[in-house]
Amino acid sequence: MTSYTGGILTISDKGSRGEREDTSGPQLQAMLGEQGFSVVAYAIVPDEIAIIQKTLLAWVDEKKIDLILSTGGTGVSPSDLTPEATKAILDREIPGIGEAMRQASLQKTPNAILSRGIAGTRKQSLIINLPGSKKAARENLKAVLPALQHAIYKIKGGTNDCGS
């Protein structure tokens, strides 16, 4: 198994002001570590498109992080703008990742249909939006985690077939 780098971006107005403890970010760091990822970046930012995009662009374009997981801002509240911020900087979307996460969550709650998280690539990085709650972030990542090493391999130009 190849070792890839990871970044965790928690998107929360209250978290960025120190008014709420981030529980999903540290959990995602642990989950990636268990899969052999080296988490090289972690930040908490407010629900503001410009700040989200600035962070994502720096992590992709400058730090060249292989996998970036955002947590938070994927619902239907007026301040939930993570998918819009992410979509604007992607080269390509990967709809199957969001679909798989929502399908897995739907087995646990009908509210899963309200999650708007997306996934896609920018350059050779994979970016995935996860829900902000610790439980939902864990369940959503767990649904797609088995495919992520291979996805990153292919994004970076790997030529082995998907069935290999």
Image (cartoon, rainbow, N blue to C red):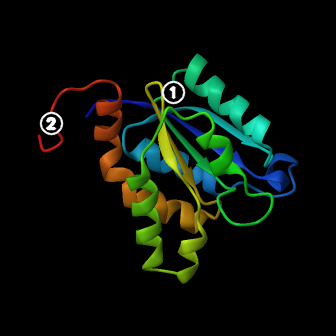
Q: Secondary structure at mark 2?
A: loop
- Residue shown at the point (71%, 54%) measured from the top left: 22
Quarter where residue 115 is shown: bottom right
- Residue shown at the point (70%, 38%) measured from the top left: 43
Q: Which mark is residue 65?
A: 1
With 135 as the anchor, is 149 left or right in this view? Answer: left
Given residues 157 and 136, the one toward you in this image is 157
Q: Secondary structure at mark 1?
A: loop
- Quadrant containing the N terminus is top left
Q: Which residue is mark 2?
A: 161
Q: Is residue 53 above or below residue 113?
A: above
Q: Mark 2 vs mark 1: give the one in front.
A: 2
Q: Is residue 3 above or below residue 22?
A: above
Disc 2 residue crowd, few under 14, some 14–19, many 20+, Cα 10 Å:
few
Disc 1 residue crowd, few under 14, some 14–19, many 20+, Cα 10 Å:
many
The percent coordinates of residue 98 (x first, y second) are 46, 57
Instruction: Name the amino acid type tagged 1.
Output: Ile
How much space separates mark 2 and mark 1, taking CA atoms?
A: 24 Å
The percent coordinates of residue 74 (x first, y second) are 64, 58
With 104 as the anchor, is 22 left or right in this view? Answer: right
- Residue shown at the point (53%, 82%) measured from the top left: 110
The percent coordinates of residue 37 (x first, y second) are 42, 36
Given residues 54 and 94, the one toward you in this image is 94
- Residue shown at the point (60%, 60%) measured from the top left: 131
